[in-house]
Amino acid sequence: MAGRAQRMAGRARRVVAAGPARRAVVAGLAPRGWARRVRQVLVAALAGALAVPLLAASGPGTAPPLFSAGLIGNDQALQPVPPEEARGAGYVRDSSVLRLADGRYRYLPAGSTDAVTVAAAAPGAIAAVAADRAWLAAGEVPGATAAERQAASRSLLDLRLLLRPGGAELAAQTPYWTYVWPRDASFAAAAFAVTGHQAEATLILGFLSGAQLPDGTWPSRSHPDGTPVADGRPAQLDATGWVSWAAWVASDGGRDAGVARGLWPTVRAAAEAATRSLGRDGLPPAGPDYWERREREPTLGTAAVLRTGLRAAGDLAAALGHRDTAARYRSAASRLSRAIAREFSGPGGFHRYPVGFGGPPQPGDGPDAAVAWLAPPFAPATRAVRAGVAQAAAQLGPGEGGAVPGMPWRKGDYWTPATATFALAEMASGDRASAQGRLRWLLDHRTSLGAFPERVRRVDGSPRSVAPLGWTSAIVLLTLASEARPLPIPGT
């Protein structure tokens, strides 16, 4: 009881200590069982609005149809391949040149915004295939089997197509997704880095550096020219963690001094923002995470990522000789780590929201796929985290198949990012059998052109929404890379 009272008092002090604007934001953060009379008045008015996702694409409702089965493109333009046009077609091996059902080739010539359809022997098409293969050969195509290497090749090429001049890594091609989310772009940068495509990794991180706001955070998403998307969405604090982690990966843990020095101002500003965000209870404030919903309490999805980013920032600071700064970031990460263990761990493993305060659970509380971000390659494995990942996987992705992000989605479509996230945690933690089972499921549920869709229908296994989704492609690449050798873990 004493520990519970201290945590409740700490949260109360945190709200009182905040300025008026901050108090207005966190007024809904009162822990369950505290200020019940106030909450009874507020809950009825707020529950409906707060439960509504910020993005229709991220909600647990019916998924949109499959908009595209794949892409062709160049530096000037991207062109989706609609599902009806993909019938009987396939990419020429290790390329983004499309072989149509009649044997002709379709591609976007360099400098053109319009696709052309030519004979298979046309010099331009042959040159385009050769260029794609040369780019792949300059790095590494991970995978233990031919099917895995084929999926890795396609994923790399899809990420390359989604990378626009100037470093804007689009989440996907279709209009609703043609923006840069810091999270998705950070994963793409990490995937490029671990597969030997350093130029692409640093280009993406350079774009993210330019999109960073003066306070060290990022807008929830940006246009390809780097300007924020002005749609009223609050920033997602987890970007400060993801970008710092990706910079640490791209700089080879700080061993590439040139890359580390170039990215250090961005990482330092992000880490300062993350450190400032931690309250007296050691947790960040409530705010949208990868679920992209308004929240009344801190979430595991933000806390886990900030811990990873602070550890990565501490490592980079140490590599560059900033010892005092490194110690400060590592201290903040340790304080956050203790808060995560204390606040999010409860009956049934790790929860999405803090537990142990009594009262009714938050809507959507329960297991969260973000528990995987407490595990390798983001943090060292512990017995509690291994158990937490296994428990969440059993509830959200049973049978080593498709998974969902959390309980609101438990009866709806499977989500490939959540599925791949569990696969990465399992592979990086040494549970190869479970990881390979999820990889097989992912490979079996791609589009006819081999692209990973955002969602997969539970009822018939058909791909839904948008394909290729860059985030899933990047997570799969990281999983396949960790199959051959352990990925680095910040803070170790």
Image (tube, rainbow, N blue to C red):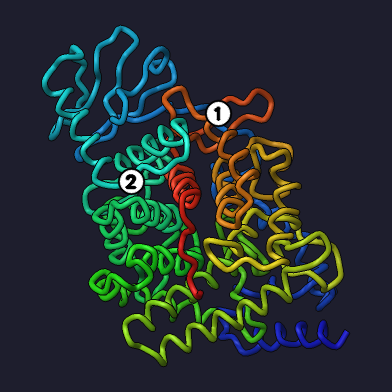
Q: Is 397 placed left or right of 302 in the picture?
A: right
Question: In the image, residue 337 lies at what x, y percent?
Answer: 62, 76
Alpha carbon distance from label 1 to label 2: 23 Å
Mark positioned earlier in the residue sequence (1 or 2) = 2
Q: Which mark is residue 140?
A: 2
Q: Nearer the viewer, residue 122 or 26?
A: 122
Residue 48 visible (yes or no): yes
Q: Using the image, tell me which numbered label, if any, was put on residue 296.
A: none
**x, y (%) of residue 87?**
42, 14
Residue toward you, 56 or 312: 312
Q: Quadrant of residue 127?
A: top left
Which of labels 1 and 2 is toward the front?
Answer: 2
Residue drawn at x 77%, y 82% is: 8
Q: Which amino acid, by three-letter code, is at mark 2?
A: Glu
Location of the N terminus by quadrant is bottom right
Instruction: Say whether residue 368 is left or right of residue 289.
Output: right
Binning the other alpha carbons within 10 Å of mark 2 as few (below 14), some (14 to 19) or many (20 upward) gives some
Position in image of residue 301 (x %, y %): 60, 62
Q: Splitting the image into 4 quarters, where does residue 430 fall?
A: bottom right
Mark 1 residue crowding within 10 angstroms, few (<14) / some (14–19) / many (20+): few
Q: Is residue 145 left or right of residue 24?
A: left
Position of residue 39 relative to residue 198, above or below, is below
| Residue indicated by mark 1 | 444
Q: Is residue 414 or residue 426 the one in the foreground?
A: 426
Q: Is residue 229 visible?
A: no
Say which residue appears at 65% left-offset and 42% top-offset: 403
